[in-house]
Amino acid sequence: MVCGSKKKSYLKSQNLKIFGQGKVNGIVEISGAKNSALVLLVATLLTNERIILENVPRLTDIEKMENILKNLGVNLVDKNNKLEIDSKNISFKELPYELVNGLRASFFCIGALLSKFGEATVPLPGGCKIGSRPIDEHINGLKALGAEIIIEEGIVKAKIKGKKNKLHGTNIKLKCPSVGATETLIMAASLAEGRTIIENAAREPEVQDLCHMLNKMGAKIYNSGKQNIIIDGVNKLGGCTHKVIPDRIEAGTFLIAAAATSSTIRISPVIPNHLKAVINKLQESGSEITIKDNSITIKGKEIKGVDINTAPFPGFPTDLQAPFTALMTIANGESKITETIFENRMNHIHLLNKMGANIKLNKNVAHIKGVKTIKGMNLVGSDLRSSAALIIAGIIAKGISRVYGLEHLDRGYENFESKLKTLGIEITRELSIENLSEKEYKINPELEEIRHIKAA
Ligand code: EPZ
């Protein structure tokens, strides 16, 4: 089980020790998608009947979302990767800041709570390491659906206007295909009166998975995965059982690790259509890829430099930009990586250069000249996906690397190091207890037993 956030300081003192120039080989099982499971958990607020969610990844972000739902009064039975959720006794209350802070997806609750209670009070999600993360699209869309919204002292207060206590369908045109805004508005519109059309909607597989589950609950949503989503509001939503789709970002991360080590692995379960842009770029850079039903086999060969521009789905996903950049550091030839989604998602570049990569960064464009090899060293990940990129760099590098900042990694990759170990990588999670202050160390007796655990 991943350590909960209460031992956050303890997590900071952990690192992954990686012996470089490894090869991966074998089969890796892909977990359920974090960015689907999070929004599906929010959607359970829309019904008073039981929802069973299967294939839920065990991640700290999921634990945080579970705590938020429990705080609202949701009865949640956690059977490891299967959750039984019953929201019939939830009570209206403000989402507490200490629970929502650091979990942007918690803000997506606003649409569901507004539809359920006619009002919602949710703290503003802070910006984070990768960008300012505004919520104007969420706010404008909810206003168009008939909500009155006040933002004061970092708290967003939403209330349905008029006596009906129901939102009303309308046409909404998003200025950018925001995943979160599309999801917030779909949930709000599913119980509104009349038809809502969301133009320039996000088409990501996680948005489609949300629509799939809502339709199982009785919603009337059409065209998910297309540019304009249509939602005909219904009076109530029922329960259902739903299996979370496989995590395309985890899958892509392992494909990139195989390409970077010129190795052969098979990943499954996956939905190949969710990875088209990534598969195309890996093939262009020299890997051989075969697809069979719900599995993909990659044979990494010589690596050629290729250019990528991140884009909304079905384009190349921003969440795989950092891992792909790590791959390009040792490609033959030059490559250009352009991040178009987030304004500050190049934090890994300077660390890759410290390892010996040759990258010139100009705002959000990285110009990479491939080098023969990079060298292992101590590295600190600053966000979820850059941490994954540093681990790939550690696997490529000559010598030993230690990657810190595992509190980021554990947010989004289930059992990452044990999966890599199974594939043949020499990687261990090291605890450096002495980093803990005496006070912290004494408070938590559980840490006592951890002291005796040899590094895994
Ligand atoms: C989701 O974030 C994902 N998170 C992110 O994954 C992912 O990188 C992102 O979509 C893009 O695919 C979850 O699903 C929990 P956006 P989200 O709203 O919804 C701008 C990971 O590593 N924007 O699509 O917050 C925004 O500034 C995480 O797993 C507005 O301008 O992303 C950004 O430039 C990181 N106004 C762009 O849209 C708004 O109201 C895309 O953001 C909302 C967004």
Image: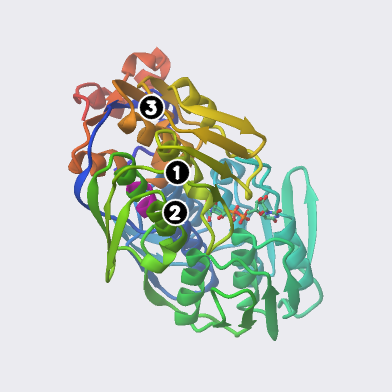
> Which residue matches tag 2?
281
> Which residue matches tag 1?
324
Q: Residues within 10 Å of mark 1 (few under 14, many from 20)?
A: many
User: Secondary structure beneath disc 1?
Assistant: helix
Mark 2 and mark 3 lie on one chain; the one further toward the N terminus is: 2
> Which residue matches tag 3?
403
Q: Does 451 sit above or below residue 141?
A: above
Q: Does 374 sit above or below residue 148?
A: above
Residue 413 % position (x, y):
37, 46
User: Secondary structure beneath disc 3?
Assistant: strand
Q: Is residue 311 left or right of residue 251?
A: right
Residue interval drawn in magenta: 250-254
Mark 2 and 1 residues: CB-CB less than 8 Å, in contact? yes
Q: Is residue 167 left or right of residue 5?
A: right
Residue 368 % position (x, y):
52, 34
Q: Nearer the viewer, residue 10 or 197?
A: 197
